[in-house]
Amino acid sequence: METAFFTTQLIPALNRGLVMSVKLIVPAGTFGLIFGIVIGTLRTYGPPAIRRVANGYAAVFRGTPLLVQLFILYFGLPNLGIYLNAYWAAVTGFILCSSAYHSEYIRGGLLSIKKGQLLAAQSMGFSTFKTMCYIIVPQAIRRALPGCSNEIIYLIKYSSLAYIITCIELTGEGKIIATRTFRYTEVFLFLGFYYLVLVTMASFMLQKLEKKYKIPGFGQA
């Protein structure tokens, strides 16, 4: 009977939740990074008015709890006539929050690049836009990769908040089983193991990516 609990109830439920967690993490991590690059670039090189807007965006989403943001998206927007189902509210919240943090790492990477590179590219006939796209931003992304990788690891863990707005992912499935069977110790130990495996796999892949795109001579050898 002990074995039956794990094989017929717990593991199938957690595997179901794992699929939903991956569906949350992949788009949120991808678009969060893309939007973070755009916002970080605008915060550093944008016109003054746009820079203030981008800084305000980062301040709001870095300064308020993610859970509050999810509540506003899922429970608050319907009052304005905007309806998002639980999945899209969770993905949107994760993208908005993650991109704000990514923008800070990208901004740091951009500030570490000497202004002489921008001037040199412009002296060779590059427009400011092409200089940013082909010379400045790619270097900044490579320098910001460790920080951005850390944010993706955080995203894996705070994706567990999605179940609070009824998007039943890994933590939500575990909570349902634990509440139904009162076997909290076994359920949450297994749940923690699932997250540990996810984070370990992501860390391994991100370290490979950092190693591949590291800048020779930059940082510790």
Image (spheres, rainbow, N blue to C red):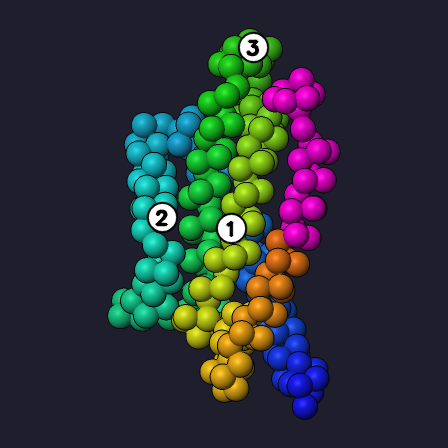
Q: Is residue 80 left or right of residue 204?
A: left
By secondary structure, the bulk of the magenta-drawn segment is best described as helix
Q: In which quarter of the image is residue 170?
A: bottom right
Q: Give the range drawn in magenta.
A: 200-221
Q: How far apart are marks 3 and 2 (CA)?
A: 36 Å
* Residue nearer the viewer, 149 or 56: 149
Rendered position, 108 above or below 201 = above
Q: Nearer the viewer, mark 2 or mark 1?
A: 1
Q: Nearer the viewer, residue 154 or 192?
A: 192
* Above or below for 122 versus 148: above
Categorize mark 2 by other alpha carbons within 10 Å: few (<14), some (14-19), many (20+).
some
The mark found on residue 120 in the picture is 3
Of pointers 2 and 1, the one earlier in the residue sequence: 2
Mark found first going from the N terminus, 1 or 3: 3
Indicate which disc, 3 or 2, sits on the residue closer to the N terminus: 2
Q: In the rendered structure, which amino acid carries the disc numbered 2? A: Phe
Q: Quarter-wise, where is residue 45 in the image? A: top left
Vertical comparison of 167 with 220: above or below: below
Q: Does the magenta stretch include residue 211?
A: yes
The label shown at residue 154 is: 1
Q: Which residue is drawn at 45% across and 59% down?
A: 92
| Label 1: which secondary element | helix
Q: Which amino acid does label 1 sit on?
A: Tyr
Task: From the top left corner, tell me how far across and down residue 219 is, in percent.
Answer: 61, 22
Q: Residue furthest bottom?
A: 1
